[in-house]
Amino acid sequence: MTRHIRHAAAFCALLLVALLLNAARVQVVQAGSHDGNSANRRADIARYGQPRGDILVGGRPVTGSQDTGEQLRYERTYTDGPLYAPVTGFSSQLYGTTLLEHAEDGLLAGTDPVLAPLRLWRDFTRARSPGADVVTTLHPAAQRAAYAGLRGRKGAVAALEPSTGRILALVSVPSYDPAELSGNGAEVARAWARLNADPDRPMLNRAVRQTYPPGSTFKVVTAAAALDAGVVTDLDAPTDSPDRYTLPGTTTTLTNESRGCADASVRDAFAFSCNTVFAKLGVETGVAHLTAAAHGFGFNDAGLRIPFSVAPSTFDTSVDRAQLALSSIGQYNTRATPLQMAMVAAAVANGGQVRRPYLVERAVRAGGGTLSATGPRPVRQAMHPSTAVRMRALMRDVVERGTGANAAIRGATVGGKTGTAQHGLGNSGTPYAWFVSWAQGHGDPEPKVAVAVVVEDAEANRGEISGGGDAAPIARAVMRAVLGS
């Protein structure tokens, strides 16, 4: 009997060892494959098992969490969803996260290690910390002014604080309501299919993910490069420019929409946006100086994040003289996001210094303690300070006596530049209307806001008139909102 008991005990011990080995194999060796198995919902259940941290604008949350009582318990909610969608993006139980919801997902979801005071204990218990709140730099009144100005149109607005790089407004129209994508039911799948099939692409963030030919707004870069290089020393001297400029090495001629461009000074050519003067000036300045200026402003920077990624704006550095002439007036392969052109205006307003833009002011624990804060980013000098002074004078002339009169604000100093960008086969598309600007209130020691506006479906298609007529009033409304605060 004793022998049988020993055999049974040995067999039970063997079974126990086998069970332990199998458990170790499942939990250690095969853990990765089980975690990644589409049938494993534990991660999703844990992810949506607690409220998500909020995104704040002007001290108030524009997001929330709704208890559905289902297995994936909490769904994301949005206040003024279409207004802030180009900033928040969406957090969907079916389709994941985008934009700020994605870039700050660890903090919002409570999984970022910085939220756990005892990291080893959290790893052992698999507990989640409460999600943190993300405080944005947005100016609520500026955001609303930009959205109201574009409503019914197609385009985008970006606004910055020149001295710091804080993003004050980021708007893209048409937009969408991220709440439509929050859950996991059939209606979410239908909304996803409808939004992706929409030819107007409402989920495209035109302010940072779409590049456009900047047209004559790029003349700010060309003028700064020419001044820095010493090609232009007197803004009021005649430029010996023809009314019809033949592109070097070709028989193609460039003309102007404005009158009086023949032999115009740089000051007059900038105010009334003479293409021939700036095409010729770009060729005289040369590709090396123009490339250096474009890079200084931020063109060809593929690493810009705010904290989500920004499409790189491009200036082609491998061009012949004819292509350089077109590039100098914002055509050919030159392309820019609205955010990039706001950076150009901000550099002029900030003495030639470019601050890298940022959208997140700080992250705050659920209990109120600050986790991290974002101050002004490092400075890059895009032009000499003396050049910036003269560029500010040129941009003031555009508003005071040139094509940008619709951006004028009583009691404030405003500088701007209109632009109309041709596009489409044979330039057959309705031109994009651009306006870039900065504003300084009476009594302010420095400009408080820089803005870039692009309208894709501009009503007018005559040269610079659409930039001043369609885009400038939107910029004015955004600047007034900031100055008024």
Image (cartoon, helix red, strand yellow):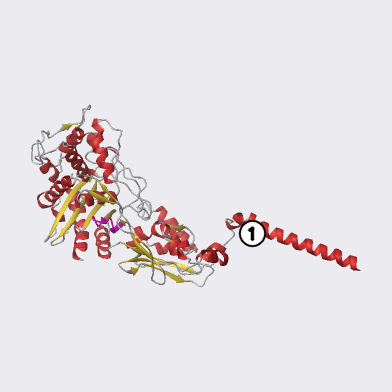
Rendered-image quadrant of the C terminus: bottom left
**Residue 103 in sight in this render:** yes
Q: Mark 1 sits on what residue?
A: 27
Q: Is 477 within the magenta?
A: no
Q: Looking at the picture, tell me which residue is in the foreground, 329 or 468.
A: 329
Residue 319, by quadrant, is top left
Left or right of 3 in this view: 265: left
Residue 259 image position (x, y, % from top left): 10, 41
Query: Height in image: 62 above or below 208?
Result: below
Q: Looking at the picture, tell me which residue is in the foreground, 449 or 373.
A: 373
Q: Looking at the picture, tell me which residue is in the foreground, 217 or 406.
A: 217
- At a point 58% along the width and 58% down the height, the residue shown is 35
Name the amino acid, label 1. Gln
- At a point 16% along the width and 40% down the height, the residue shown is 227
SS for dot 1: helix
Query: Magenta region: which residues?
Result: 159-171
Q: Is 162 within the magenta?
A: yes
Query: Height in image: 335 above or below 376?
Result: above
Residue 404 image position (x, y, % from top left): 15, 51
Residue 71, by quadrant, is bottom right
